[in-house]
Amino acid sequence: MPLILAVDDSPSMRKMVTFTLTGAGYQVVEAVDGQDAFEKAQAQLFDLILTDQNMPRLDGLGLTRKLREHPQYKTKPILMLTTESSDLMKQAGRTAGATGWLVKPFDPARLLDVIQKVIK
């Protein structure tokens, strides 16, 4: 069963994402910001990271860059789930190594569809 790290500083958003993913049969670990996520990603290996962009301590792009420096996360899917929708921000996401970009509020069916496409 794939293990997903859901990163968002909003407790209600984390709950919605976790509810959607666990309902589809995924295991989910939650992180409250990028720094928390990075520490959890070093402690165990996740099959996919789903992260917000705007968070305290370490934002989504910073988290993506840090994860991509580690061999075990070089090819793991990292999806950005954020209110940011500008092309400039999406380009920054691609440059940092993000696999995909989903805009909040998210459609649960679309989120699951994207995850099924990128998860190995």
Image (cartoon, grey):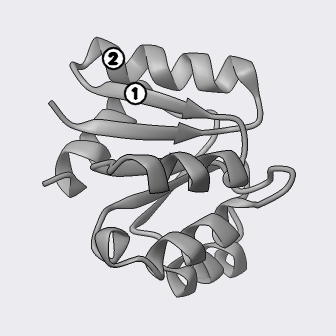
Quick check: 111 left or right of 1?
right
Amino acid type of disc 1? Val
Q: Which residue is mark 1?
A: 28
Residue at 62% x, 65% y is 63
Residue 75 picture location, percent across and down:
28, 73
The C terminus lies in which quarter of the figure? bottom left
Residue at 45% x, 13% y is 19
Residue 78 picture location, percent across and down:
42, 60
Residue 49 picture location, percent across and down:
43, 50
Residue at 59% x, 16% y is 15
Question: For residue 24, what is the image quadrant?
Answer: top left
Residue 34 picture location, percent across and down:
68, 53
Question: For residue 4, what is the image quadrant?
Answer: top left
Q: Secondary structure at mark 1?
A: strand
Q: Are marks 1 and 2 in contact (CB under 8 Å)?
A: yes
Amino acid type of disc 2? Thr
Instruction: State the residue in front, 6 or 20.
Output: 6
Q: Residues within 10 Å of mark 1 (few under 14, many from 20)?
A: many
Which of the two labelled residues, at mark 1 and mark 2, occupies the earlier sequence position?
Answer: 2
Q: Is residue 93 above or below residue 85?
A: below
